[in-house]
Every structure is written in C-alpha cells, then in structure tokens.
Image (cartoon, rainbow, N blue to C red):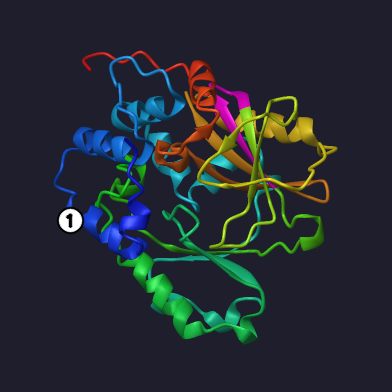
C-alpha cells in the first residue's frame, strides 16, 4: 500500500530533516523502505523487473567513478569536452567554494545559479534581472548549499552525490525563450548502453511549480504513458528539425553507462547541454499505465556483478 507521505508531512524541509536523522539506516534497508512507502510496491532486488526497481539496484551495486564526475554540474563540462562536444556547453560565469568569494557586481544582468550537486529542481535559482533580485536571499541560499556535508547521505541514497566532493556554487548563462511557445523545451533522453529507450519532453516550466511532461519513443512519437507525479504535457510539441542530432548527441554522451538520462535543450536549432542524471526521480515514480514501468525495465539491461 502506497503512503501519501507528502500529505502527512507537508513541509519538504521537515521531510528532508527526518531523512537526515535516519541516515544511520543501511542503504539497502532505507531504499527498500522508501520504495515501499513511495510506490506501494515491494522492492525485488534479486530479480528486478521494473525500471524503478532496477534504478534501486543501480544505486546500491553499480559503482563507476565517472558517475561522480558526471553528477557534478561543473565537472561534467570536462566530460562533455572529452567527448568532443564543447560546442553544446552553455557559458559559465564562475564556480565558487564559498558565497564570500562571489563577485556579485561582476555577474551579468541575468544568470542561473546552481548547486553543483543539487537535484530535484530545488537547487537552481533563475535571475532574469539582477537589479530586481534579492542578493541577500541569493547569498543565503548559496550558503545553505555549500554548508551541506560532503559525505552526508542524500534522501535517495544516490552515492555519487555524497562521495566527498564539496557542494559549490555555479553561475551559468540564462537562455531566454518564448513562453508562448512553451519556453525552453527540455529533452531528457533515457539511454541504456548508448541507445535511446524513451524521451521526456518538458515544456511550460515554472521553476518550483512544475511543468508539462510527455513521454516519447526514440522516433519522437508520443506514447500513451505518463508520470503520475508530474503534470501532463498539454502542448503539442513538434519533432525538432535537428532531432536526429539531439539523439546522436545524447547517445554519444551516454556511451559506456548501463543507464543515464541526458538532458538537452534546443534553442533555435542550437543544442545546449543541461545535465546527466543516473537516478531519475530517485526511482520512486509511478507510471500510468503501470505496465510502462516494466516495459522500460525490459530495455534496461543490468550489468553482471560478482559477489552480490
């Protein structure tokens, strides 16, 4: 039975605090507990079939140090360069260990501020006009990010995010887009061993207030499947003219990983890199129909590991 914990404990901050207090619980036990509470299903790690089950297995057993680099929103830029794709990187204005080091006056009028190891959309701040921004609030937010213990286990027990690497403050270029056309469309490619299995297409995003999400197949045909924890995509999104290049780019970045989500944007025909994520939704999402969880799981071939 699934428990709607968000209705019971409405404050996200309180929920995260509780999870912090439970950090002593072993990863395997905690992952099983959270999976049961959030999905209502029992987690089978010995013979996982669902995509969401396989993501839990992936968290617990698959360790590749490249995942530490690619999870970091600044260091992943070097990985992208190594792949010969520097041209898709957005402009960076600086990376800082401390908020005290930031030269706020030197920042442009618009920018995006990120926690290099943040996730879930709560560690990104978009500033469209610096003259109207509350700099004191930005400093407070950035200080909260850098204060996070580098080895504190995160809520989903996603090991690359607490490997000992420090949380830092990253400033990047803000890309404006026409809100009437859905804003900056986000194409999230789910790739297994370098091949696209499906794509989330996200439009009409309002940071902190969700967005419209549609699921498409590798040929960009919209599927009759949805994420129950996300708002459905209502806008009709046409196949981008450079879609094949978008897919080729995602697949090149995903080579060698059993599973990774590669996020790309299309800004008037120019491909822009977003991020790489190995544990979408921490693997605690629900699909409609439920069968889609199994279908995506079928495409995810887990690596053979010894001594499990």
Q: Considering only vertical position in the picture, is 41 above or below 30?
A: above
Q: Residue at x 76, y 48 (%)?
A: 235
Q: Residue at x 56, y 30 (%)?
A: 254
Residue 264, image x, y percentages: 66, 44
Majority secondary structure of the magenta segment?
strand
Task: Report the magenta residues as a range.
Answer: 186-197
Q: Nearer the viewer, residue 247 or 28?
A: 28
Report which residue position mark 1 lands on.
Answer: 21
Q: Is residue 178 visible?
A: no
Q: Nearer the viewer, residue 173 or 218?
A: 218
Q: Residue at x 28, y 55 (%)?
A: 150
Q: Residues within 10 Å of mark 1 (few under 14, many from 20)?
A: few
| Residue 47 inside the magenta-drawn segment | no
| Residue 189 inside the magenta-drawn segment | yes
Secondary element at image label 1: helix
Residue 135, image x, y percentages: 51, 83
Would residue 280 appear left or right of 83 to someone viewing this image? left
Please state, as top left, top right, bottom left or bottom right, where the N terminus lies in the image.
Answer: top left
Q: Nearer the viewer, residue 207 or 251?
A: 207
């Amino acid at each position: 039975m699934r428990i709607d914990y968000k209705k019971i404990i409405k404050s996200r901050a309180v929920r995260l605090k509780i999870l912090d207090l439970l950090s002593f619980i072993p990863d395997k036990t905690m992952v099983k507990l959270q999976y049961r509470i959030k999905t209502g299903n029992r987690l089978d790690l010995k013979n996982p079939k669902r995509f969401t089950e396989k993501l839990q297995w992936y968290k617990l057993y698959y360790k590749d140090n490249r995942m530490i680099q690619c999870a970091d929103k600044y260091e992943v830029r070097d990985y992208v360069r190594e792949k010969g794709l520097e041209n898709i990187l957005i402009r960076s204005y600086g990376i800082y260990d401390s908020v005290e080091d930031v030269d706020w006056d030197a920042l442009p009028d618009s920018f995006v501020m990120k926690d290099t190891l943040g996730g879930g959309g709560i560690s990104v701040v978009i500033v469209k006009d610096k003259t109207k921004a509350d700099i004191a609030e930005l400093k407070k937010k950035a200080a909260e990010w850098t204060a996070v213990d580098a080895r504190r286990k995160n809520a989903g027990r996603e090991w690359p995010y607490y490997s000992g690497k420090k949380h830092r403050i990253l400033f990047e270029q803000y890309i404006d887009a026409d809100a009437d056309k859905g804003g900056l469309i986000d194409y999230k490619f789910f790739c297994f061993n370098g091949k696209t299995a499906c794509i989330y297409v996200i439009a009409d995003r309002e940071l902190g207030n969700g967005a419209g999400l549609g699921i498409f197949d590798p040929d960009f045909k919209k599927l009759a499947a949805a994420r129950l924890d996300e708002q459905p995509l209502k806008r009709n999104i046409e196949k981008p003219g450079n879609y094949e290049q978008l897919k080729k780019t995602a697949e090149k970045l995903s080579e060698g990983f059993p599973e990774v989500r590669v996020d790309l944007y299309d800004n008037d025909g120019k491909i822009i890199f977003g991020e790489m994520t190995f544990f979408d939704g921490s693997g605690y999402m629900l699909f409609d129909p439920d069968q889609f969880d199994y279908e995506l799981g079928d495409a995810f071939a887990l690596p053979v590991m010894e001594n499990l």
